Image (cartoon, helix red, strand yellow):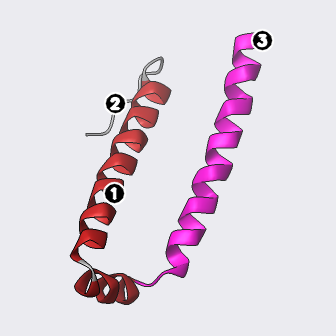
Amino acid sequence: MEALSDFNALQQQIQASLVAVTRSSQAISSEDLGFHRSLDPSLGRALDTQNARLLGLAERLLGNAASNTELVRPK
């Protein structure tokens, strides 16, 4: 039971962090990002790298969450 409560606490922390990141990212409009990408190509590469990293983390998180259930892991 302790492992389940630890997981639930971790899940709540992760969800709160994801909500905070989502809200922060929504504050920056896509037009602003396009403008900044055009000014600094290295920023565009850095954004692409971070987007890929976040996508990989989200996929791993969803895969781990679905591993002990009958749910099919998203691809």
User: Of the numbered discs in the image, which one, if any, rests on residue 2?
Assistant: 3
74 vs 33: above or below: above
- Callout 3 touching callout 1 (CB < 8 Å): no
Say which amino acid is labelled 1. Asn
Q: Earlier in the sequence, mark 2 or mark 3?
A: 3
* Mark 3 and mark 1: Cα distance apart in space: 34 Å
Residue in view at x 68 percent, y 51 percent: 16
* Mark 2 and mark 3: Cα distance apart in space: 26 Å
> What residue span does the magenta drawing correspond to?
1-29
Q: Nearer the viewer, residue 71 or 73?
A: 73
Q: Nearer the viewer, residue 4 or 33?
A: 33
Q: Earlier in the sequence, mark 3 or mark 1?
A: 3
Q: Nearer the viewer, residue 33 or 46?
A: 46
Locate residue 73: give its quadrant. Answer: top left
Instruction: Judge left or right: residue 57 versus residue 41.
Output: right
Q: Earlier in the sequence, mark 2 or mark 1?
A: 1
* Mark 2 and mark 1: Cα distance apart in space: 23 Å
Residue in view at x 34 percent, y 57 percent: 51
Q: In the structure shown, which secondary structural element does the residue marked by tag 2 occupy?
A: loop
Q: Is residue 23 magenta?
A: yes
Q: How crowded is the residue under tag 3: few (<14 C-alpha within 10 Å), some, or many (20+)?
A: few
Say which amino acid is labelled 2. Val
User: Which of pointers 2 and 1 indicates the residue nearer the eye?
Assistant: 1
User: Which of pointers 2 and 3 indicates the residue nearer the eye?
Assistant: 3
Locate residue 11: give its quadrant. Answer: top right
Residue in view at x 31 percent, y 62 percent: 46
Query: Circle 1 is placed at which residue position?
Result: 51
38 vs 41: above or below: below
Q: Magenta stretch: dominant SS?
A: helix
